[in-house]
Amino acid sequence: MGNRRRVAERSRTRPAVLGGVIAVAVAGAGFGAYALLGGGAAAEDGARGTSTAQQAKDVRTGPLTPAEVTDTARRFLTAWQDGKVSEAAAATDDPKAATALLKSYAEDARLEDVTLTPGTASGGKVPFSVKGTVTYEDLSEPLTYDSALTVVRRAGDGEPRVDWQPSVVHPELKDGDKLVTGASGTPPVKALDRDGGELTTAEYPSLGSVLDGLREKYGKKAGGEAGVELRVVRGKASKKAELADKTLLELSEGTPGTVRTTLSPSLQAAAEEQVAKKDRASVVVLRPSTGEILAVANSSHGFNTAFQGSLAPGSTMKVITSSLLIEKGLASNDKQHPCPKYFSYGGWKFQNDDKFEIKNGTFKASFARSCNTAFISQAPELKNDDLTKQAQQVFGLAMNNWQIGVSSFDGAVPVQSAAPMAASLIGQGGVRMNPLNMASVAATVKSGVFRQPYLVSPEVDGRKLATAARTMSADTLAQLRELMAYTASYGTAAEAMAGVGGDSGAKTGSAEVDGQKKPNGWFTAYHGDLAAAGVVQAAGHGGSTAGPIVASLLKSGG
């Protein structure tokens, strides 16, 4: 089942059975003068017989005092541990939501002999640790995890209250989720790499979400038997976001079934090593001739951005746009093509990075240097749905029909008009992709045909892989390969691709994101029978951020 981590590593919390003795340990600056003795919450939160004018006059403002923070945290934590759900909920700024989750925690969990240890308050934030024992029939296991609460001023009267979030109860919880201990219902799985070796989070840390997804999809099909465990049961919002239920603690492991994946142990290890060098980095490696996923890694081990991310791909989208322009006779590699400093369309003024221009240059030169206006200038010649059709019909994207073996997002290229349509041509506007999608784009160029990526062979469960309606013409494909090869040798991808050599091609990308000082850096490339794409968020240009990650994996083979 992929070495599903136990207490400290996966720290999932069981709803507490509060009938046992509950001890409260006090520690940390800011709490030394207060004992977590409980009481007082109901009276303090009761109705006050004051006039509206008096209430307005008495509204508390300004920064929270240390006393307000510690007293509010004390009231909440003590009431929660004493099983006084209404009192604990009243100490929050959302009593209704808090009551529902705390009640579920008390009724569904089997956590006994709980000890809470508050840490040092920092501003309004108060960390605390939870220790207890999860018991189910004749099974029991110790549980520890860390959480935190934040005290804020309540809207309206300024009273200090705990800012209610499900993560206060357990950091893995999101809106609608709950903690449950019992028979899991889904047997564990033992996931294998392509060579038959077991895939574990101990060896491959970023595979946690992948292993969770494999269990959810294949647990009942792989022949295992369910065990007893404490787990996060996802609510509607989390399921809509395609988050799998997550095991926090196993009381009995059950008997795992076996699922073989397409992952290459050597490439997976290399991918893990590469993304660990950057914050918020993700990468995917594919085999173009088959569609097999050889590696997937994220430097952040929670959400699987590589498979499920929805990000603007920036100029890597120009691979798809170029195929469209060439097919329509609006561009040709060695013909002159406009690349002005600016081009206005639909009321927006577009420009190139550092406002450069290429005078009397070819389309190949514009692609290699990633000239935005070379693509935006063709917007008046295109229909609103041209790019959408190209992405769907040739590259197999944005039809919501990929079945790779775990949850994934297969891109979005919505039909847009005016300026947003023009922005889509350079991977902005409404276009959204992830490394899996952009690795598939490079693979399609390399092989000449779209093959849906997959992590588990369709022969395992008889599922039907997605297909594209058509392929590019031989001339279009030849020109597109020439564009990517030239960019890898002489364009914005040349520095990263130095030393890769052979039959290779690449495209860089940078995607501006509101609120970020630096853009997301993208890079997609192929070499031999490998294709890969990566993104490093809020890091800068793709050639210098994601490029070295992708190029290193192409060099390492698999």
Image (tube, rainbow, N blue to C red):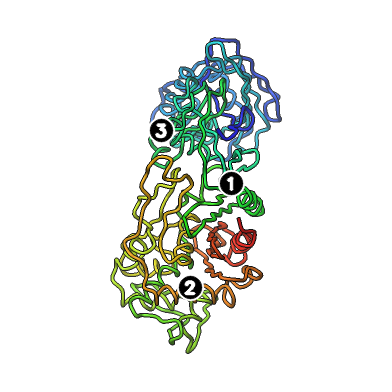
The image quadrant of residue 544 is bottom right
Q: CA distance from mark 3 to mark 1?
A: 23 Å
Residue 539 % position (x, y) = 59, 60
Between residue 54 and residue 232, name the one nearer to us.
232
Between residue 265 and residue 275, name the one nearer to us.
265
Where 360 falls versus 504 (above or below)? below
Residue 157 % position (x, y) = 46, 34
Residue 542 % position (x, y) = 57, 65
Check the picture and name the quadrant holding the N terminus.
top right
Say whether residue 1 is left or right of residue 342: right
Q: Which residue is mark 2?
A: 481
- Give the amino acid type for the residue marked by disc 1 in the picture: Ser
- Give the amino acid type for the residue marked by disc 3 in the picture: Gly
Kindly state the secondary structure of the residue where label 2 is placed.
helix
Crowding at mark 3 (Cα within 10 Å: few <14, some 14-19, many 20+): some
Residue 57 visible, this orientation = no
Evaluate if marks 3 and 1 touch, with contact meaning CB atoms under 8 Å apart: no
**Disc ID at residue 120:** none
Please state which of the two labelled residues, at mark 2 or mark 3, is closer to the viewer. Answer: 2
Kindly state the secondary structure of the residue where label 1 is placed.
loop
Residue 30 % position (x, y) = 68, 30
Check the picture and name the quadrant holding the C terminus.
bottom right
The answer to which of marks 3 and 1 sits earlier in the sequence is: 3
Q: CA distance from mark 1 to mark 2?
A: 33 Å
The image quadrant of residue 253 is top right
**Disc ID at residue 235:** 3
The residue sitting at 41% across, 75% down in the picture is 375
Between residue 74 and residue 157, name the one nearer to us.
74
Crowding at mark 1 (Cα within 10 Å: few <14, some 14-19, many 20+): some
Evaluate if marks 1 and 2 touch, with contact meaning CB atoms under 8 Å apart: no
The residue sitting at 43% across, 38% down in the picture is 238
Q: Which residue is mark 1?
A: 300
